[in-house]
């Protein structure tokens, strides 16, 4: 796009008199295809041009087909302007993110993708704190929760070779991705923007100003439901192979997008979060492989399933620790 074309698109925004007007003009340009490269353009781009287009695709994903919206009923929340929208029967909102009078993102957020409102209340934060403390108390008392924990540790000892292999393989792929980012920093930043866009789309930014307690609960909810359960336990039920392959790709991409090449000194601060969260997903992957080993070894699917659930349980404990550290990290350190 030439300089004149860019001026024709962005100059009216600079002259807009209010965030609402700025947001409305941005949405009109977005709907007109002036902001978003198509996925086809990204895939066909040259190696030099691809990172820029991919980053722009992350910030301004194309409008979904059949999108209808109401530009006359905007709502302003901080630096975001929200317009009611729908795709068929799926209601949601088009979100315009503003920073310093400039449009940084435009995207459609379905209502079902947003965080549940109750998670953002102070009551939910205090509830997660009390639940965490009560759970820790049960782990140090004779209880089924302590028994399951000890059984999970016994499982790690019984299959220590498989557990060590899973750790070396997946952490190794993360390290490989981090090293690759040093050679392709522009592409790594573009992939990082894709991750940021996904977190933006679920409304995680709403929790960052709510304090450590609320943020910890939201982080745990997202990592547990989407990471450990939906993309961990569910595919692990199919004898471990799908979750192993999925996490192999996930760890390579995570390393690429969260490399020290991009994070700099912040990487060391964020390292405990990475180790804890990645260990949780390693555990459920390990559990899936134990399920495969027990079934193939003649012990039966049922015993393998118990092993998977024990690894899943231990992974959830790691996510509780990760959520508290990351919430403290984001609120107080970063």
Image: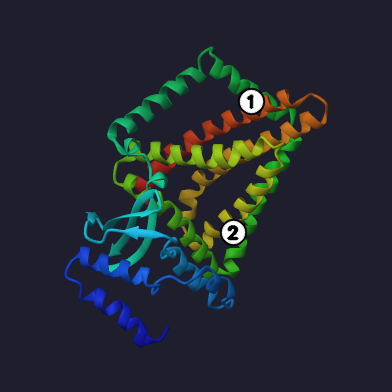
Q: Is residue 1 visible?
A: yes
Q: Which residue shows up at 69% across the image and 42% down it?
A: 166
Residue 297: x, y in percent? 83, 29
Q: Is residue 79 above or below residue 18?
A: above
Q: Mark 2 = which residue? A: 178
Q: Residues within 10 Å of mark 1 (few under 14, many from 20)?
A: many
Sequence-earlier tag: 2 or 1: 1
What secondary structure is found at the residue carrying circle 2?
helix
Quadrant position of residue 286: top right
| Alpha carbon separation for disc pair 2 and 1 | 31 Å
What secondary structure is found at the residue carrying circle 1?
helix
Q: Is residue 52 above or below residue 84?
A: below
Residue 150: x, y in percent? 62, 21
In this view of the protein, which residue sits in the foreground, 169 or 249? 249
Q: Mark 1 = which residue? A: 152
Q: Residues within 10 Å of mark 2 (few under 14, many from 20)?
A: many
Residue 138: x, y in percent? 48, 18
Q: Is residue 100 visible?
A: no
Mark 1 and mark 2 in contact (Cβ < 8 Å)?
no
In this view of the protein, which residue sits in the foreground, 305 or 125? 305
Residue 313: x, y in percent? 57, 28
In this view of the protein, which residue sits in the foreground, 237 or 214? 237
Quadrant position of residue 291: top right
Quadrant position of residue 328: top left
Q: Is residue 104 above or below residue 49?
A: above
Which quadrant of the figure contains the N terminus?
bottom left
Kindly give the residue lying farthest to the left in the view shown: 17
Q: Is residue 210 above or below residue 41?
A: above
Kindly give the residue lying farthest to the top in the view shown: 142
Q: Which residue shows up at 69% across the image and 37% down it?
A: 238
């Amino acid at each position: 796009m030439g300089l004149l074309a860019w001026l024709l698109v962005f100059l009216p925004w600079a002259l807009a008199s209010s965030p609402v007007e700025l947001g409305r003009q941005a949405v009109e340009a977005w709907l007109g295809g002036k902001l978003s490269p198509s996925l086809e353009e990204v895939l066909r781009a040259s190696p030099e041009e691809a990172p820029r287009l991919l980053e722009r695709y992350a910030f301004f994903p194309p409008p979904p087909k059949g999108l209808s919206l109401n530009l006359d009923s905007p709502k302003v929340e901080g630096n975001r302007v929200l317009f009611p929208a729908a795709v068929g029967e799926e209601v949601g909102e088009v979100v315009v993110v503003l920073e310093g009078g400039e449009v940084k993102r435009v995207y459609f957020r379905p209502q079902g993708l947003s965080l549940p409102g109750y998670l953002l209340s102070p009551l939910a934060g205090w509830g997660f704190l009390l639940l965490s403390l009560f759970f820790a108390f049960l782990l140090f008392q004779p209880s089924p929760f302590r028994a399951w924990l000890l059984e999970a540790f016994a499982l790690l000892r019984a299959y220590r070779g498989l557990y060590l292999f899973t750790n070396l393989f997946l952490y190794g792929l993360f390290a490989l991705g981090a090293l690759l980012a040093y050679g392709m920093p522009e592409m790594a930043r573009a992939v990082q923007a894709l991750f940021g866009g996904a977190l933006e789309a679920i409304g995680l930014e709403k929790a960052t100003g709510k304090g450590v307690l609320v943020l910890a609960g939201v982080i745990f909810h997202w990592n547990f439901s989407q990471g450990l359960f939906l993309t961990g336990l569910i595919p692990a039920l199919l004898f471990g192979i799908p979750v192993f392959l999925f996490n192999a790709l996930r760890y390579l991409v995570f390393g690429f997008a969260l490399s020290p090449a991009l994070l700099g000194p912040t990487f060391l601060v964020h390292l405990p979060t990475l180790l804890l969260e990645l260990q949780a997903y390693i555990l459920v992957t390990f559990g899936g492989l134990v399920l495969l080993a027990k079934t193939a070894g003649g012990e039966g699917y049922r015993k393998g399933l118990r092993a998977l659930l024990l690894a899943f349980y231990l992974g959830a404990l790691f996510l509780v620790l990760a959520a508290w550290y990351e919430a403290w990290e984001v609120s107080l350190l970063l």
